[in-house]
């Protein structure tokens, strides 16, 4: 497995990943138009992601097969806020064929390490729907702590869904 920042050139493998996993990820995702995961849409979004990376507002990673022809999972850091907050949000997904194999944990740990060592942030925020036990277990293994519960927090698959609020604090943060 290879882990890298997603960037222009990855539009085909990302389009294939999301098209192949549309039903698998639907219950955890916002409603999107059908064209959202086309190669053309990914071409534009990867350009936008490059601008966000340069602006230091987000970083998007993918785990791929060794040949870089298939996406195994994604992990994104968004809403990077500096100043007195020094925090970000993390989001992730894994290909249905690779669930339960530890690949998502490897990618998420890589991303956490990047946030704390390269971005030098103080806190990573992660939220999940209460019935998403796999996400809960992943965050527990990574050391995230539950901080609260938000009712009707995000609109997922067309419905307002409750979320469990979690964070991971950088114990080595010197700000």
Image: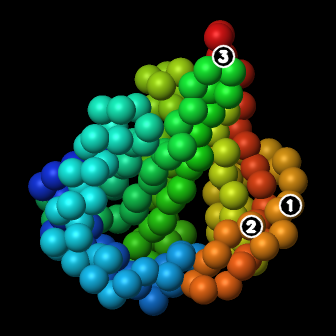
Q: Quadrant of residue 53?
A: top left
Q: Tell me: residue 50, above or below residue 86.
A: below
Q: Residues within 10 Å of mark 2 (few under 14, many from 20)?
A: some
Viewer-closest of 97 and 29: 29
Q: Mark 2 sits on what residue? A: 153
Residue 153 seen in the current view: yes
Q: Tell me: residue 85, above or below residue 148.
A: above
Residue contact at pointers 3 and 1, CB within 8 angstroms? no
Q: Position of residue 104 (x, y in %)?
A: 49, 58
SS for dot 1: strand
**Does 9 sit left or right of 146 as displayed?**
left
Q: CA distance from mark 3 to mark 1?
A: 27 Å
Q: Mark 1 sits on what residue? A: 149
Residue in the image at 67% along x and 45% along y: 125
Q: Tell me: residue 130, above or below residue 124.
A: below
Q: Position of residue 71 (x, y in %)?
A: 29, 65
């Amino acid at each position: 497995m290879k882990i890298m920042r997603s960037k222009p050139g990855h539009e085909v493998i990302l389009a294939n990943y999301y098209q192949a996993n549309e039903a698998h990820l639907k219950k955890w995702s916002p409603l999107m138009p059908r064209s959202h995961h086309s190669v053309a849409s990914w071409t534009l979004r990867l350009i936008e992601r490059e601008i966000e990376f340069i602006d230091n507002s987000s970083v998007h990673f993918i785990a791929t097969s060794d040949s870089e022809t298939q996406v195994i999972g994604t992990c994104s850091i968004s809403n990077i806020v500096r100043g007195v907050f020094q925090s970000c949000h993390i989001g992730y997904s894994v290909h249905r064929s690779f669930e339960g194999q530890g690949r998502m944990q490897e990618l998420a740990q890589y991303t956490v390490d990047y946030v704390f060592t390269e971005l030098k942030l103080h806190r990573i925020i992660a939220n999940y729907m209460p019935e998403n036990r796999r996400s809960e277990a992943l965050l527990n293994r990574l050391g995230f702590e539950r901080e609260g519960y938000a009712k009707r927090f995000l609109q997922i698959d067309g419905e307002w869904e409750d979320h469990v609020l979690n964070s991971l604090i950088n114990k080595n943060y010197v700000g």
